[in-house]
Amino acid sequence: KDDIIIPNHSSKFYYLQQAAHTIRLKKLTKMQSSTAHESSTTETVSWRWKNKVMQPPEFIETENSANSVPLLTDLDSDDISFSRRPYRTPRRIWLAFVFWVILLAISLSRAKVPKRNGINLDKLFNSTIFPHFESHLTRIHESIRSQTSERLLPGETLAKEGARAHFPIIMIPGFVTSGLELWEGQECAKKYFRQRLWGALGTARSFFTETECWRQHLALDPISGMDPPNIRVRAAQGFEAADYFMTGYWVWDKIIKNLAAVGYDGSNMSLEPYDWRLAFPLLEKRDGYFTKLMHKIEAMHKTSGRKVVIVAHSMGTPLVTYFFAWVTSSERNGGGGGGSDWVDKHVHALTNIAGPLLGVPKSITSIMSGEMKDTNVLMGTFGSMLEQFFGRRHRKDLWSSWGSLWAMLPKGGDEIWGTGADICNNAHTQGECLRNSKVPSSLAFPFLSFTDNSSDARGDDEDFSSKTDERKNTVLEGVIIAYSRKTKWTVEETLSFLNKWGTGIGEEHSGTKYHALDHRIRNLSSRDWNDPTKTPLPKAPNMKIYCMYGVGIETERAFFYKRNVEDCDTDKSECTASRVHLPFIMDGSVEDHEENIKYGVRFVDGDGSVPLISLGYMCVDGWKQGRLNPSGVDVIAREYQHQHEFLVDDPMRGGPKSAEHVDIMGNIDVSQDIIRIVTNFDSSKVDTNLISDIEGIASRIRMHSSRTPWLQKRIFPVAKSIIQKFSETTTTTSVCSSHIS
């Protein structure tokens, strides 16, 4: 009772409401089996909670003092619990899994399986199982689409109020949510010509029946970052490329349907898909994507007489900011030559939905070891099955070949990520996010923490090198050994390692060639155009940027790693290659619920995929600075509290108030705000609305940065890099010497 703290901040009221709801339910449950007298008390308490729960913190006091019931003090200590639950797989994921298994079982029961020996698995899946499976799924899919209620279509409501199509719209999809089609392939894939290898039910078919063939065709050449020889996979086109990821799983469909309700169609809105695997510069080099996008916007502007609204989701937002830098740069500098005022002339607003402006932490673990939270949660039998079927090494090789993942590495360096300004603990603050007491005061918050003990973490250099026989890997061995001596890596150190290691290829890897992994600002080039902490917004004083993102979901922020000895224990033939190509793996055994650490991952607030600091920092602080916003572009940040709701007619999603990274595309409040912007109908109602601690996070970053001495920020990093380079050189020399001897 005495440890309860009520903060005097309305912005923290969500946590009070959540706590009150928990207390009320526990109290009611306890009183239901009590006497009649206690039952009447329960009704009184319940009435007061229900009527006061939406009030400020003073709701603890009752209106009628004579009838007052000390609600909090009336509860036993056993009735109150503010500790967060351990991570559990969301219910909708399990429901989706059961849903798919049931459909597959139905398909198997109806399939006419040949009763003879030597059944070809590919023919079995293609001729029997998947046709039945897809037909059942299509029926359910059509049922879901036909049962959409008016409550879930704010476009129809606004249309009745007078909203009509106004600004033309360009929609830019995000990472992995649009389809990829095969145009040329190896012998194993020729039967999939012009069919989707990604973004359809056929994706699952080709993955399960021909995993290695599927992986080869989705991977890019790690050196060039382009297509492998004799393979051409291209983005699907039109609205169908991203309206549904696959049958039954919508992405842009809800937004398109709401826009159609106010008068939009293919003549005044367009979805511009792209090959989301490619590094941004290669989209222009291979496909001419930015040139086509520039001409598309110019054409829509000319035919309508109005500026364009760009609606971008997820990685689509960094792609658009890269496009702004490209189109306003001269052709001599690798740009589109549109002129410095091109954006101001042609773009009314950029609507940024869940854009990872400062990158995504799990992009590092995906590139480094082919892992993330979801792979770590699959423990036991499921984890073993995953490793045998599509193991870390295969996942790492595939994902690290995608230049887009390198484009989403964290931006801003240790001055933003190293302060730990967004790190929370589970102290009894009723959910209020306080700065973790364990976060160091210097710019040194670890992004990767190694759990090996000191001797193991530093490793025996001689033993390590003796187990790797390939002489050509001595330089990479030296890099790995040098970094193995540290048990905690900051973001800058982690990016420096990726830059030098290059996933076992070295600095020749395309990811390091097309992206500036050094946070320091030198002469800006196209390698910096996707980094908003380096490249300023265009000179567009009449443009607006709307940042719309969800909060209230645990999201990956930092990770725990260890040296990879598992491959050496299980397969000696893999040991040598793993020493260079997969030297470190995640340690899923680390748990500390007080510090929000589960399965070797430290969690913070966010939308389930992108942490809050990446979603909102630039919108509330970074772009408020003159250096990064020279013309004073109006930036409006709107946050949406995640509220999960199960719908029978859409069982695999989080409901109309979900703020999860992809589900937010069906959030009715987001759809309503987008319609107000593009129709110019009461667009003034779409103003700043912050419910998280993002302003406090930005304030702590500013305060920390102002306290950091100039020598520590500018001179020390240079000296540190020189010392580290010397250390790596000496380590490499010793490794070479051991081989020579």
Image (tube, rainbow, N blue to C red):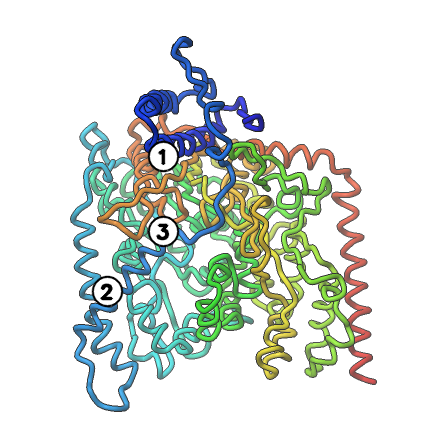
Mark number displayed over residue 29 = 1
Report helix, strand or loop for mark 2. Answer: helix
Q: Earlier in the sequence, mark 2 or mark 3?
A: 3
Report helix, strand or loop for mark 3. Answer: helix
Q: Which amino acid type is shown beneath numbered disc 2?
A: Leu
Q: Mark 2 sits on what residue? A: 103
Choose mark 1 or mark 2, whichever is in front: 1
Q: Which amino acid type is shown beneath numbered disc 3?
A: Arg
Badge 1 crowding class, 10 Å Cα cut-off, few under 14, some 14 to 19, many 20 or more, is: few
Residue that appears at 74% across and 68% down: 459
Report helix, strand or loop for mark 1. Answer: helix
CA gap, disc 1 to disc 2? 38 Å
Residue that appears at 49% across and 34% down: 692
Q: Is residue 111 left or right of residue 388?
A: left
CA gap, disc 1 to disc 3? 23 Å
Residue that appears at 81% across and 74% down: 733
Q: Earlier in the sequence, mark 1 or mark 2?
A: 1
| Place of residue 25 in the rendered image (x, y in percent of width and height, measured from the top left) | 37, 33
| Place of residue 642 in the rendered image (x, y in percent of width and height, measured from the top left) | 40, 39
CA gap, disc 2 to disc 3? 18 Å
Badge 3 crowding class, 10 Å Cα cut-off, few under 14, some 14 to 19, many 20 or more, is: some
Residue that appears at 36% across and 72% down: 207
Quadrant for residue 135, please give it.
Answer: bottom left
Q: Which amino acid type is shown beneath numbered disc 1?
A: Thr
Q: Is residue 308 left or right of residue 370?
A: left
Depth check, front residue: 504 or 75:
75
Q: Mark 3 sits on what residue? A: 91
Badge 2 crowding class, 10 Å Cα cut-off, few under 14, some 14 to 19, many 20 or more, is: some
Depth check, front residue: 319 or 620:
620
Q: Is residue 140 above or below residue 9?
A: below
- The C terminus, quarter of image: bottom right
- The N terminus, quarter of image: top right
